[in-house]
Image (spheres, rainbow, N blue to C red):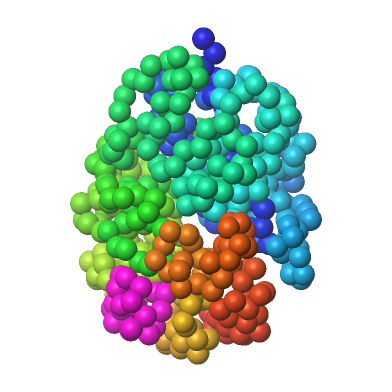
Amino acid sequence: MNNNILVINPWIYDFKGFDEWSKPLGLLYISSILEKEGYNISFINCLDRNHPDVDPKYNEDPKKYGCGKFPAEEIEKPNIFKGIKRKYKRYGISEETFIKELKSKPKPTAVIAGALITFWYEGLFRVIEIIKEIYPDVPVIIGGIYVTLCFDHAQLKSKADYIIKGNNPNDIINILEKITGQKRKYNWENFCDYPTPSYRLLNNPCAVPVMTSMGCPFRCVYCASSILNKKFQSADPKKLADEFSQEIENMKLTDIAFYDDALLVDYKRRTGPYIDRLIENGYNFRYHTPNAMHAKYITEEVAESLKSHGFISLRIGFEFIDDQMQKKTGGKTTTQDLINASKALYKAGFKKENIKAYILIGIPNTQPESVSEAIKACCDLGLQTHLSEYSPIPLTPMWKEFPGTDTEESKDPLFHNNTYHIFKGTVISEDDYNKLKTMSRAMNKL
């Protein structure tokens, strides 16, 4: 029986693309689960900066904590983006390299792929197109965030053979059972039962992401976390650390990025013990929090622990300074929470260079003055700011508040691209956006 499964992480098609610990963690989990089920896994990462065909200047660098630019090629803009005076690019390895990689792998029984962001579906579609050209008899299975949030679009446009909504690995295994005749061995309903992601499929990374939990207990109206994960789940931290240690034993990792949506929830029993166990196992990494931490959980005790455990890049989800907006959008933080958190972090020994507060820009019913006030407040607290451009996400409560979501144009997930709305001036003008970005950069240097 041929049980070779090819897992593919597609390209990014966008106006911008930067590797800030961007690894396909979901696909690595699926790969590991399928290996436990007895399948032979091959893997192609279209965003592999360490690929031999990629110019070494793009390779991961421990001095930059593993972050950096993707190789990119300018491509023609889709019609919806015509008139935007920015270059549109395909980020990642070349198509020639992808095809070479594809032909070097054993012919698969099935291909699995997914798009991390809804408006990145073009990269996924191109992968499907190439697979169909080279292996027309091989079924393609797609899932992930794009499919879950834009299921109708995926069904209508993707040309995939199987389209899986949600994030239950059993759904993929059930489909593979039909294709291969191989019976499922285990039940994968709960995050705590997941094996460590197959990091060894990556090409010599110096940084990888980890998760000690899945989902988030908060229900912010602009976020899709509660749609993608119906409940907040965590796993035994020592078990996670031991399995991770075994998986990366022969890898030269220097940096770890936490992908948890709620990293500091129950920190004493989860994240702290997880890192302590890694230290016991002989690993001392630098840690980063690109998904942002909740300010209300950063007490003096937690801040001291973060410092002693080796956290370097701290991101805090502030989002708004207006208290009514804070309450309306989910109540996950207050300005006082941010004040308390900043004091605790500075007392623990962190510097301004270590800390950034995320501020949302381009939200319906918010004014540029409110964003500038938030930037000033963060600067006064000694915090850097990062302006996060809001993307309208279908199925979230805020989707209905965003202008144009009832139009024919909004049926294309490219409508979700924040650059498009900034250029179009849907919620904030391009001039105001550029002024706020300039202000943020200037105050970060103070």
Q: Which residues are magenta?
A: 318-341
Residue 204 visible in the shown view:
no
Q: Position of residue 402 (x, y in %)?
A: 50, 72
- Which residue occupies 41% across, 62% down? 396
Q: Position of residue 313 (x, y in %)?
A: 45, 63
Q: Is residue 54 left or right of residue 168?
A: right
Q: Residue farthest to the top?
A: 1
- With respect to residue 436, does 143 lie above or below? above
Residue 89 visible in the shown view:
yes
- Which residue occupies 68% across, 24% down? 135
Q: Is residue 205 left or right of residue 171?
A: right
Q: Position of residue 289 (x, y in %)?
A: 42, 59
- With respect to residue 314, does 438 lie above or below? below
What is the quadrant of residue 291 in the picture? Answer: bottom left
As rendered, which of 43 and 280 lies closer to the eye? 43
- With respect to residue 140, does 302 lie above or below? below
As rendered, which of 174 and 273 lies closer to the eye? 174
Q: Position of residue 1 (x, y in %)?
A: 51, 9
- Which residue occupies 50% across, 19% down? 179
| 272 inside magenta stretch | no
As rendered, which of 159 and 194 lies closer to the eye? 159
What is the quadrant of residue 17 in the picture? Answer: bottom right
